[in-house]
Amino acid sequence: MANTTIIYQIYFDDKTKSFINPVAILLDNTWQDSKPLQPAFENHIIQNVIKYDNNLDCDYLGVLSWQFETKNSYRLSKIHDDIEKYPNHDIYSFYKGHTQPNIWRVAEGWHKGIIETSQHIFNRFNGVKIANINTPIIYQNAHLSRTELYKDYVNTWLNPLMDIMFDEEDKKLQDMLWIDTKYKSYSLNRDKISKITGVPYYPMHTFICERFFSTYCAVNNPKIKQLC
């Protein structure tokens, strides 16, 4: 029996909607003033998909950005054939060309202080020393994973890690998180970023959260296939 997949792609206006591949389910994240802030960007959406979508009756699940194909040079229309071509993997991702053994040490070169900030979170979570482990390379939450594995990641890692991240009682952590990372976006201007994050720049949250999944994989050792 062929494997079944559910792939969501997130968009937030007509322009970004035009990039969605027809194999994906549209996930509307159009900004409204009544919405809560999303400084961790798509990670908030991933939480809600797992919490509220009662129709995840599939073998593999992905929650991807509207930019997925342009950033990864991979057409989602190939995904079903590739899963059949390379069967029996827990995760399919798209970073074959990345060979550095630790996703956090690479991040430190782009976002100074990310290891210290993230280790503070992990010290409160499970104590894993993130700079000392070999992590699979998965960026941007760009992966299709067995649905039960995806649910386990969100319920046992992403949710509690983000609870720690947004603990306002931890003043030291909040000071480290809300720095200006100097990240430049070509799809969002400062006004739109302010509406999403509450500040006119990208704070640390999203860059930390996109590395949680690789760390989960390092600890749990699932079978991963990099498709490109």
Image (cartoon, grey):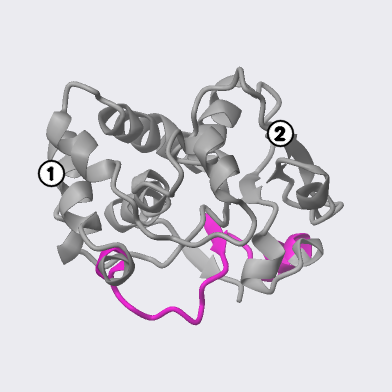
Residue 51 visible in the snapshot: yes
- Horizontally, is 82 left or right of 135 in the view? right
> Residue 21 occupies which quadrant of the picture?
bottom right
Which residue type carries mark 1? Gly
The picture places residue 167, in percent across and down from the top left corner, at: 25, 25
Q: Which quadrant holds the C terminus?
A: bottom right
- Horizontally, is 73 left or right of 22 in the view? left
Span shown in magenta: 79-105
Using the image, determine if residue 179 lies above or below residue 222. above
At 38% from the left and 60% from the top, the residue drawn is 182
> Which one is nearer the viewer's eye here, 110 or 122?
110
At 67% from the left and 59% from the top, the residue drawn is 67
Residue 89 visible in the snapshot: no
Residue found farthest to the top: 34
> Which one is nearer the viewer's eye here, 180 or 35?
180
Residue 127's mark? 1
Q: Earlier in the sequence, mark 1 or mark 2?
A: 2
Return the residue at label 2.
30
At 48% from the left and 64% from the top, the residue drawn is 224
The picture places residue 61, in percent across and down from the top left corner, at: 63, 44
Asked if the magenta segment contains residue 100, the reply would be yes
- State if disc 2 and disc 1 touch (CB < 8 Å): no
Tell me if mark 1 has few (under 14), some (14-19) or many (20+) residues whose alpha carbon lies within 10 angstroms of its own. few
Q: Disc 1 versus disc 2: distance between alpha carbons?
A: 37 Å
> Which one is nearer the viewer's eye here, 55 or 30?
30
- Horizontally, is 166 left or right of 57 in the view? left
Q: Secondary structure at mark 1?
A: loop
Which residue type carries mark 2? Thr
